[in-house]
Image (cartoon, rainbow, N blue to C red):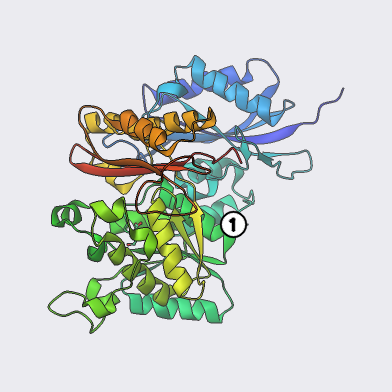
Amino acid sequence: MVRSRITAAIALGANVGVPERTFKRALSLLERDGDIQILRRSRWHGTGAVGGPAEQPDYTNGAVLVETTIATAALLERLHGIEAHLGRDRAREEPRGPRVLDLDLLYALDEEGAAITEGGPELRLPHPRMEERPFVLGPLKEIAADQRLPRSGRTVTEQLAFLEEGGGLARLDSPAEARAWCDAARAAGASIGFVPTMGALHEGHLELVRRAAMENDLACVSVFVNPLQFNDATDLEKYPRDFAGDAALLAQVGCAMVFTGSLEAFFPGELVEGELPAASHVAPGPSAAGLEGDFRPGHFDGVATIVDRLFDVVEPNRAYFGAKDFQQCLVVQHVAARRGGQPEIVRCPTVREAAGVAMSSRNALLDGASRSRAEVLSRALFATKAAWAAGERDAAALSRLLREGVSMPGIEVEYAEVRDPEVWTANAPEGVMERAVGLVAVNVGGVRLIDNMEFDEGTR
Ligand code: PAF
């Protein structure tokens, strides 16, 4: 049988050991069986680490273009085999942590030069993050400068220049400027997907922005640490802030505009002695009662008030929220309903770190010991979900399991309970449940963390 030849681009990265030597060994292993030929390789580039633990060494990155007759899945398997052979242990590594060797398949072209697409859980081609990463595009430019990229339609050279010039991102300092920008975009016929945030952006937020950019003409983001939703002054003060870093990340994920502001700028002329009077507040609705509502009095009032104002500014078609804040999603649904169903609220799945911890801006405040203790939240949720899958339907038994699962030294449990995700009740329901979501809130090492899991998710 004559097997068709494909051309594939592979990115190399490492920041442990001597990357140049590891890369050399990786490339000779790649060519060892004679069915892969290296056509071109970039120089090795030194780049700072992006995300992950603080103070990890700088990375060395490169790219190679290969020609092969083996299929893309087999090529990926070969790359993983080489990583393992040279010392990488995927099961034990930290997300974005130090790497002995990282080999990523970026794209593959068939004999006609058309991009091969793969959408499975193991292999996605073209690589979904390739266009966001200057440290990938830099080396790639040396070996495939004119290759057109699928998402942006730009060549590698054009996309790299675009990112270096700020990714076309408008950075605005006031809600008034943001309103004018959104009005102009809407007048030009563009649909707007909106992601409200309090900054300190992580992969969970970036996923919301990517989705907003994919499902709308323009994605925009607000970064505002909203004092109205903090009932604890120390918590407000400690909340991480990094607007420049946030904007740099947003420039890479297809965000068109980011804006920030102050309480005064969001509520001009409404503050009385620095406080927002009751008449300017928006009621959060019935799903604010219980759990978060009990432990953070006034929190959802503050959320509803700012989200309603943010919607006034942006007037988005769709607004994207993470399911990690389950009760908040219900509250913003209520806010949208009282605005006549606008915008459409899109609840997006929680993004988890490899150890299961739900991504949160507050994770940045955890020290080493607290970080590993934090794994107990998702472990308890998965264990209760397993009991649900095995047939447990009694509300009290499920809540008990969840609480037992999170109770351990060093963890102060605020709540661990189940609710019916479709019929919110302030108190835990009793008896047999038809649907269930487990919700937990704990304090670990002085940091408040929440998480939840719908037990039927992925099974319906
Ligand atoms: O989820 C958040 O970050 C905040 O509660 C929100 C929705 C941006 C309102 O300040």
Label 1, secondary structure: give it. loop
Give percent across and percent down for residue 382. Answer: 44, 32
Lateral position of residue 84 relative to residue 243, left or right: right
Give percent across and percent down for residue 181. Answer: 44, 77
Location of residue 438 (image quadrant) = top left
Q: Which residue is drawn at the image coordinates 53% and 78% (left, top)?
A: 186
**Which residue is identified by label 1?**
152
Q: Which residue is drawn at the image coordinates 29% and 29% (left, top)?
A: 372
Q: Nearer the viewer, residue 159 or 50?
A: 50
Q: Which residue is situated farthest in the bottom direction here?
A: 269
Q: Which residue is drawn at the image coordinates 87% and 22% (left, top)?
A: 1
Above or below, 428 against 154 in this view is above
Q: Nearer the viewer, residue 64 or 413?
A: 413
Lateral position of residue 202 relative to residue 216, left or right: left
Residue 253, visible in the rendered structure: no
The three-letter amino acid code for the residue at tag 1 is Ser
Residue 288, visible in the rendered structure: yes
Give percent across and percent down for residue 429. Answer: 41, 46
Q: Residues within 10 Å of mark 1 (few under 14, many from 20)?
A: few
Q: Which residue is situated farthest in the front direction here?
A: 431
* Numbered marks: total: 1
Give percent across and percent down for residue 316. Answer: 49, 71
Q: Nearer the viewer, residue 181 or 111?
A: 181
Above or below, 369 against 165 in this view is above
Q: Quadrant of ligand 1?
A: bottom left
Lateral position of residue 177 relative to residue 64, left or right: left
Lateral position of residue 254 relative to residue 121, left or right: left
Q: Which residue is situated farthest in the right direction here?
A: 1
Instruction: Tell me the quarter of the image containing the C terminus.
Output: top right
Location of residue 330 (image quadrant) = bottom left
